Image (cartoon, grey):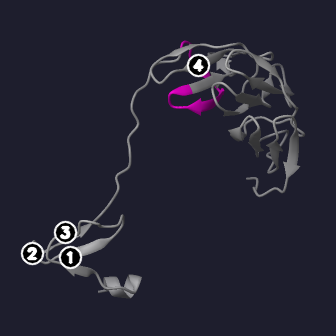
Amino acid sequence: MTTYKEIFGKYVKNYSSDPTADIEGQIWYNTTSGTFKTNVNAGAAWASGGNMTAAQSQLAGAGTQTAGLAFGGLDLPSTQVATTQEYDGTSWGPGGNMATARFQLAGCGTQTAGLGFGGYIIPGTTSAATEEYDGTTWGPGGNLGTARRLFAGAGTQTAGLAIGGYTTTAVANTEEYTGAIFTPTASTLTTS
């Protein structure tokens, strides 16, 4: 039979009582109780929040748990929308509409400095458009270098990222937003 030492190269420490300053993942043997113990962090749990004012899919989001944004998307079953919903940590309410209705877009930023970019516009246009949100209204921003949809956004309104996505095929490129324009960066993704 393989021992702990053979697998990990260390012996299990013995204690007569449980350590007070244990480390996550640490394993020890309590000689008083005759049991092996470990410190495992079970993590936090999801909890229910307020429902959105309208059911939507393929939308983008930004912000925090107590100041969130949801924008664009499809109003089920299949109508693209330009609506924005704001979340206060308890409930959703209306925000300003985007200039262009679209879905499969990306977002980043905060509720008072949001960024929405790219996406898909029915009947079949992949967008490069960017819009900036100031907490009330959307205004134009610098376009993506590569129009895309089904991709990730991260960062802030003045330091955002457009990551991967789909044009007519999967793409691995990344672009950085400076608050005025998107510029390409070295690709670190692989397409699949």
Of mark 2 and mark 4, the one earlier in the sequence is: 2
From the viewer's perspective, is 142 left or right of 170? right
From the viewer's perspective, is 178 left or right of 52? right
- Disc 1 residue type (three-letter): Tyr
Q: Residues within 10 Å of mark 4 (few under 14, many from 20)?
A: many
The residue indicated by pointer 1 is 29
Instruction: Specify whether residue 56 is painted magenta.
Output: yes
The residue indicated by pointer 2 is 32
Residue furthest to the right in view is: 145
Question: Could you say whether the residue bearing mark 4 is in a helix, strand or loop?
Answer: strand
The residue indicated by pointer 3 is 18
- Disc 3 residue type (three-letter): Asp
Q: Which image quadrant is residue 15 in?
A: bottom left
Question: Could you say whether the residue bearing mark 3 is in a helix, strand or loop?
Answer: loop
- Does 7 appear above or below 135? below
Question: Could you say whether the residue bearing mark 2 is in a helix, strand or loop?
Answer: loop
Question: Mark 3 to mark 2: distance in Å?
Answer: 9 Å
From the viewer's perspective, is 72 left or right of 173? left
